Image: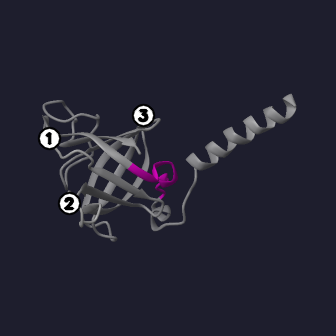
Amino acid sequence: MKRYLYLVLIATILGSLVLVTHRSRTRSDVTGTVVTQPILTGEWVQQSRIVNGKLMQDPTGVYLVVTADGRMEHHVPNEGLFQPRSTIVGNQYFRMQPSGEFLAIDKSGRPDWSDLTMGLSYLDGDSLTLCFAPKGQPRPKVLATGDVEGAGSVLMVFKRR
């Protein structure tokens, strides 16, 4: 029985490692980007959004949908009985690669990546932090916004739904 439990534990750990290092067959593989969408796939409820050092008063229930094919949809909930659950306010492609202690994340509204926004991401259990520079600016060096050296312009924190 002990032997069986050890085998199950080892299989679980190895399965997790395979999931984290999964490489998807996408165009980003050509450029060497490590695609980590499987660990981010799902719905993420926004906890906070800070823009240029100021906390935004976003409506409750804003969420992000991350798909395994490298898409991010930003949703704002609708109120009212006969309306859809939410309105998509952003629909972008994304790709990720290791960058020190964080994962570098690039997002673009275009499949040719010509409209690029660079950022950093950090996943801690069920908490996802994203920090983006303004379009056309260098990638942030820290997960911060405001008057911090190397900071981005937008910092968002999400919890997995």
Q: Which residue lies furthest to the front in this view?
A: 81
Are there few (<14), some (14-19), or many (20+) residues within 10 Å of tag 1? few
Q: Which amino acid does label 2 sit on?
A: Gly
Q: Is residue 38 highlighted in magenta?
A: yes
**Residue 8 or 29: which is nearer the viewer?**
8
**Of residues 71 and 103, which is closer to you in this image?**
71
Q: Residue at x 31, y 50 (%)?
A: 63
- What residue do we see at 69% from left, 40% from top? 12
Disc 2: which residue: 80
Separation of residues labelled 2 and 3 (CA atoms)? 43 Å
Q: Nearer the viewer, residue 81 or 38?
A: 81
Instruction: Name the amino acid, label 1.
Output: Met
Q: Which amino acid does label 3 sit on?
A: Glu
Judge the density around disc 2: few (<14), some (14-19), many (≥20) Cα neighbours within 10 Å: few
Task: Determine the residue positioned at 27% across, 47% down.
Answer: 61
Q: Is mark 2 on a helix, strand or loop?
A: loop
Magenta residue check for 93 = no
